[in-house]
Image (cartoon, rainbow, N blue to C red):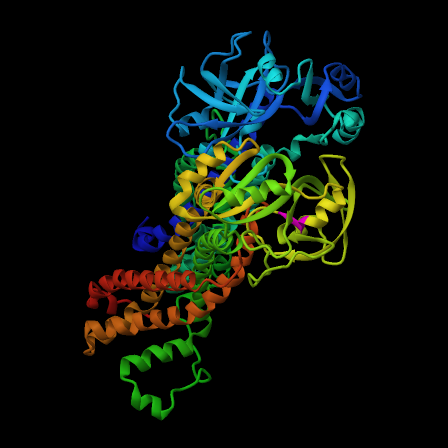
């Protein structure tokens, strides 16, 4: 305990590094298990379908045919359709999905969680249940009325309940990839009322299927497609391809990878620091070690003394980390629940996480200590009780005469110590550089998120408003938009849903048709220059090309999921550097030609006069073919919110933790240097050196170490940034791996400030040194 108290500053700093590592381990493992368990419980309790089979219109009798497919456990048919909801006081209508609920029973599959209000009354066509997050975004209350345009008709509804559902954990409007609670609604209605609204009485336009245990999805998907093909099947797909489940699954996979890769970094730093500290202790206490060995204490008893110090530091840090992990995990659970709409998400940590956290911290600390304790075994009493042999500095180099004349005595002492201890200096430089590299990499990721937004919504997408239609329309429809109030420029687009395949690799997404020389929504190269749409071929986003493992010149299979559902073989023309989503682009005329649907458009990008936006919105509301209107600024704000919550918030946590590591390394380097030179500094004070001069000798060495570590830290951070950016990037957004000077400058400044604070703390100890007691210490 006396030894620990003597090095309490260093022990505390190391324990904090251990605590950070254990905190991350407990927080991430707990968050991972909580997400997985909550998702599975939610899916099972509310019976989320394993297969979704959208269709144009199929008779109810086909449900019995689907139920006969081997491997099918249950089937439910429902009606779904797009709608536009008018919100009082809001200029733009809100995109909505309307879903049917059976009149006299609970649905067999995809049941809803009623968070407030009541279920629908059979036969009441005006009643509706609204997605809770949308209601909260617009402050809707039970009993309120809202208007919605369905299939070209305006209808009024009364809200009788608010609900959540497992198929809407990640809520995005169809065709979009950024969630926005205020711009997307889900309405649940009585089946009869919704079927009448969309002219599908006695039929369904989506089949939900659950599978028997151990049943394979692929044969069932193929059988369903064969049965529904003549009814306008849009392609059955499994839960893995459902937008909501895909994003939560990717989140879990990313968190799992981070939980495996990150905590060992902190444990390795802690082991490194413990190695240095215990090495100094053993070296400074050689005589005591020799003396107690001479009195009969065994090597194991002496080693156990020092090993206990390692264990106390490691266990104390681990216990603190467990507490911090629970606290941080509960905070992260709230952030995740803001993005993924679980009705409940309780952060719970298994006992194994605590055991693992303490065990890993003890093992990593022990690894650092065991290397040192070998020296205890090698020390015999006779050797240990003699002072260590002076180091041979004859080959360490000498300062030339010109440098001696230019430098004063304290500066020459600093340089000599550095030249004569290159191994120790190198270890300190590496430790600080690694801490700075981790900090700069995390700061680069934060800057990369901002750059993603700036490039996407300032360089790639230069429109002000985008418009989509309920169904493909003649090209004249887009040109008619140019005559609306405030419209300066119109650029038509065509999008189709499709499955893209390359061998065994596939991706369910879509193909976007752009005009030959797009101006408002462009495909760009890595240097942000335009990629002109080729006459033949397809342009793939970098993330999508990586998923499909395909490059320019290779042939891509495109299975279109609408219309006549043709299967196209298209050569890959080039790779685009799109940073949001994973789009695939073709020239619009070529896409329409391959589909056999000449002159069709599904939407348009508009550049408008901002002063006339209210007039434009009113005009768009009265355009029957318009399904959705999106302002670029709204999409940017939604993406910013997504990046700042959930997994995006993890980058702030990691940046703060990297700063803690940097300070811990710098402070320990300063304390160790002080411990090694305490007697020398006291001797200098006695022979006439001032406090400032003795402090300069110690802190000057720290300053040089920091200056050497900064450029090395920039290099480490640059390459570490590639690894971290790859971990954060998904098919939703990609982090550009460009050099971020501000990130490295901030990290370097943080190292300098940590050095100043550490130097100040150490200087206080230098000023308090008892010269007489220190000089009485025998060599």
Instruction: Name the magenta segment's main secondary structure.
Output: strand
Measured from the top left, where is residue 753 in percent x and y? 31, 62
With 335 as the anchor, is 673 left or right in this view?
left
The answer, for residue 761, to whether it is visible in the render is: yes
Measured from the top left, where is residue 141 in percent x and y? 39, 19
Location of residue 722 by image quarter? bottom right
Q: Nearer the viewer, residue 744 or 606?
A: 606
Q: What is the span of residues highlighted in magenta in the rendered image? A: 583-588
Look at the picture and state if 298 lies above or below 779. above
Residue for point 67% across, 26% down: 50
Q: Residue furthest front?
A: 483
Location of residue 135 by image quarter? top left
With 14 as the anchor, is 778 left or right in this view?
left
Look at the picture and state if 725 lies above or below 431. above
Q: Does the stretch in magenta take in 419?
A: no
Figure quadrant of the C terminus: bottom left
Q: Nearer the viewer, residue 761 or 315?
A: 761
Location of residue 64 by image quarter? top right
Residue for point 36% across, 53% down: 13
Measured from the top left, where is residue 636 in percent x and y? 46, 45
Measured from the top left, where is residue 527 in percent x and y? 56, 63
Tally the marks. Answer: 0
Residue for point 47% across, 68% down: 712
The answer, for residue 299, to whether it is visible in the render is: no
Q: Nearer the viewer, residue 647 or 350?
A: 647
Q: Does the stretch in magenta take in 584?
A: yes
Q: Nearer the viewer, residue 570 or 306?
A: 570
């Amino acid at each position: 305990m006396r030894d620990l108290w003597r090095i309490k500053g260093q022990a505390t700093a190391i324990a904090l590094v251990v605590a950070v590592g254990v905190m991350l381990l407990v927080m991430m493992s707990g968050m991972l298990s909580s997400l997985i368990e909550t998702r599975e419980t939610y899916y099972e309790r509310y019976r989320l379908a394993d297969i979704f089979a959208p269709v144009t219109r199929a008779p109810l009798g086909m449900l019995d045919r689907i139920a006969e497919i081997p491997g099918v456990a249950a089937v439910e048919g429902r009606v779904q359709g797009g709608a536009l909801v008018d919100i009082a006081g809001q200029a733009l209508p809100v995109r909505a999905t309307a879903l049917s609920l059976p009149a006299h029973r609970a649905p067999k599959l995809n049941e809803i969680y009623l968070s407030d209000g009541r279920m629908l009354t059979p036969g009441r066509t005006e009643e509706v249940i609204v997605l809770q997050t949308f209601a909260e975004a617009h402050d809707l209350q039970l009993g309120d009325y809202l208007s919605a345009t369905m299939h070209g008709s305006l209808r009024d509804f009364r809200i009788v309940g608010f609900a959540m559902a497992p198929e809407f954990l990640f809520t995005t409007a169809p065709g979009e990839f950024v969630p926005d609670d205020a711009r997307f609604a889900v309405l649940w209605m009585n089946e009869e009322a919704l079927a009448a609204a969309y002219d599908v009485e006695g039929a369904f336009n989506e089949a939900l299927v659950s599978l028997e245990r151990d049943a394979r999805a692929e044969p069932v998907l193929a059988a369903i497609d064969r049965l529904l093909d003549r009814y306008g099947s849009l392609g059955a797909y499994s839960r893995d391809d459902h937008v909501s489940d895909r994003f939560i699954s990717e989140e879990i996979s990313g968190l799992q990878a981070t939980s495996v890769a990150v905590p060992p970094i902190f444990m390795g730093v802690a082991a490194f620091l413990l190695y240095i500290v215990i090495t100094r202790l053993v070296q400074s206490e050689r005589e005591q070690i020799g003396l107690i060995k001479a009195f009969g204490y065994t090597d194991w008893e002496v080693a156990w003394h020092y090993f206990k110090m390692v264990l106390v530091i490691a266990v104390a840090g681990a216990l603190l980390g467990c507490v911090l992990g629970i606290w941080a995990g509960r905070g992260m659970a709230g952030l995740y629940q803001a993005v993924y709409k679980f009705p409940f998400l309780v952060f719970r940590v298994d006992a194994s996480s605590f055991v693992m956290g303490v065990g890993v911290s003890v093992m990593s600390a022990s690894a650092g200590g065991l290397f040192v304790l070998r020296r205890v075994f090698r020390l015999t009493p006779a050797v240990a009780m003699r002072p260590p042999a002076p180091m041979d500095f004859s080959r360490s180099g000498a300062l030339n005469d010109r440098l001696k004349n230019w430098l004063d005595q304290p500066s020459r002492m600093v340089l000599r110590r550095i030249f004569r201890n290159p191994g120790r200096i190198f270890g300190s430089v590496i430790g600080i550089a690694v801490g700075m590299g981790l900090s700069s990499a995390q700061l680069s990721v934060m800057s990369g998120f901002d750059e993603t937004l700036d490039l996407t919504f300032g360089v790639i997408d230069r429109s002000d408003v985008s418009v989509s239609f309920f169904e493909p329309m003649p090209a004249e429809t887009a040109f008619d938009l140019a005559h609306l109030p405030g419209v300066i420029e119109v650029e038509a687009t065509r999008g189709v849903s499709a499955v893209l395949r390359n061998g065994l690799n596939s991706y369910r997404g879509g193909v976007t048709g752009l005009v030959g020389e797009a101006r408002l929504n462009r495909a760009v190269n890595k240097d942000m220059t335009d990629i002109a749409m080729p006459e033949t071929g397809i342009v793939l986003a970098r993330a999508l090309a990586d998923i499909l493992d395909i490059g320019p010149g290779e042939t891509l299979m495109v299975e279109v999921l609408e219309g006549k559902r043709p299967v196209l073989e298209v050569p890959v023309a080039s790779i685009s550097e799109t940073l949001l989503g994973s789009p695939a682009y073709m020239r619009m005329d070529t896409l329409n030609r391959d589909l056999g649907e000449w002159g069709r458009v599904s939407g348009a990008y508009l550049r408008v006069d901002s002063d006339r936006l209210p007039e434009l919105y009113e005009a768009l509301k009265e355009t029957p073919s318009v399904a959705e209107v999106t302002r670029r600024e709204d999409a940017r704000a939604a993406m910013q919110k997504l990046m700042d919550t959930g997994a995006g918030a993890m980058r702030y946590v990691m940046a703060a933790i990297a700063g803690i590591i940097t300070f811990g390394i710098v402070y320990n380097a300063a304390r160790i240097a002080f411990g090694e030179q305490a007697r020398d500094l006291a001797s200098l004070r006695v022979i006439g050196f001032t406090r400032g001069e003795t402090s300069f000798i110690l802190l000057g060495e720290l300053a040089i170490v920091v200056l050497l570590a900064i450029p090395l830290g920039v290099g480490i951070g640059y390459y570490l940034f590639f690894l971290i950016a790859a971990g954060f990037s998904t098919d939703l957004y990609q982090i550009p791996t460009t050099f971020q000077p501000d990130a490295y400058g901030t990290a370097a400044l943080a190292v300098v400030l940590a050095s100043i604070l550490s130097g100040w703390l150490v200087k206080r100890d230098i000023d308090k040194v008892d010269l007489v007691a220190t000089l009485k210490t025998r060599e």
